[in-house]
Image: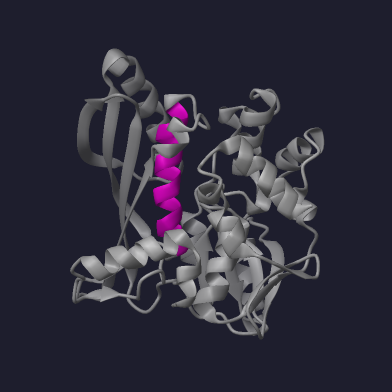
Amino acid sequence: MRLNDDVVENRRLTRWADLLPRAPRQRGGVHETDAELVDLGDGRLLALTVDTVCEEIRLGLYRHPKTAGRLAVAAALSDLAAVGAEPLGLLLSVTLPAGNADVVQEAVARGVAQAASAAGTFVLGGDTNEGDELSVGCTAAGTVPRGFELTRVGISPGDLLFSAGPLGLGAALAASTLLAGGSLLSEDDLVPPPRIAHGIALRRIASAAMDTSDGLVATLDQLSRLNGVALRLTRPPAELLHPRALQVARSLSLPPLALLAAAQGEQELVFAVPPERQPALEAAAARLSWTPVPVGRAESGSGVFVNGAPFDGARARNLLGACGRDLGAYAAALVAMTK
């Protein structure tokens, strides 16, 4: 069994790659980049990615169409940021609920426009149809100079791990919605900052990068598997949480680690930097008036280590499926494994 096959989602993505033709100019292997990279032959790589907000709506995590539009765009743009690409534009694929299409369309458009404008990019076109419930898909295209792209591969023991910002806000919103009727955090509080400029600044500085669309633990677990290294958190989980996320954890008596291990992420950027490039990172951060968050370090070995002990990343990533996608059962099991 291949190492990545321990995770159900990885196994399914590998299966798609086995079943479908692959472009001869495509760079990087399966799982190795957040956005797919295709050599244009002119010194540039075309970066392409697609994300769909559908299951979150069906499960009741996102109840407002504006949120679906905003986060579909944020998810796609975070993939471009994780490869260091500059956006060319976006395409939308939207299924509108037949009974309320016009009102929902306007709300989705407001969310899309909010996220696109924040990142300085535009919607080029797309496709619309009607169905039983809302679904918002966003394709993002960008370019990055060949040889300057970021990938998920390249981490060595000794590399330092950072996040572009505080974490856990996506999971905190889910916890507030499911456990407190949305009283602790509203959907308007989840506005992922665009990290395009940060991804560009990390070219030739970061040894690897990946976004946190599935949460920090899933990101670290994937990077550990792809690079054959152990990744250790060097700070307590509570110190990595966004202040609003920490407030939710305390209000609901949740382990801070639960908000980092949950499947609902926040579209932040996690990256590794060799120690000798840390001065370059500090200079780039100063130019952007940005403070990267130290997360941990890479070591020889394998797996993810939290609070000095190994943490089963594969189990955490497979947990929602193992619970039959029942959110109540999932929340209980996640809390139990993160105490």
Seen from the viewer's position, the closer of residues 173 and 274 is 173
Q: Can residue 292 be seen in the rendering of this structure?
A: yes
Answer with left or right where residue 125 lies relative to residue 2.
left
Q: In the rendering, at what x and y percent does residue 142 appear?
A: 31, 58
Q: Is residue 57 above or below residue 233?
A: above
Q: Is residue 233 above or below residue 197?
A: below
Instruction: Kindly report the secondary structure that dominates the magenta region of the rendered protein.
Output: helix
Answer with left or right where residue 11 lies relative to residue 198.
left
Q: Give the total of numbered labels.
A: 0
Q: Is residue 311 above or below residue 139?
A: below
Answer with left or right where residue 209 lies relative to residue 54.
right
Seen from the viewer's position, the closer of residues 6 and 47 is 6
Q: Can residue 164 be seen in the rendering of this structure?
A: no
Indicate the quadrant where residue 248 lies.
top right
Q: Residue at x 27, y 71 (%)?
A: 44
Which span of residues is magenta-colored?
Answer: 66-82
Q: Is residue 81 magenta?
A: yes
Q: Residue at x 71, y 65 (%)?
A: 294
Seen from the viewer's position, the closer of residues 250 and 167 is 250
Q: Quadrant of the N terminus?
A: bottom left
Q: In the rendering, at what x and y percent does residue 195 appear?
A: 51, 54
Indicate the quadrant where residue 220 lies.
bottom right
Q: Is residue 339 magenta?
A: no
Indicate the quadrant where residue 249 lies.
top right
Seen from the viewer's position, the closer of residues 182 and 289 is 182
Q: In the rendering, at what x and y percent does residue 133 appear?
A: 34, 26
Q: In the rendering, at what x and y percent does residue 219 appear?
A: 56, 62
Q: How is the image coloured?
A: one colour
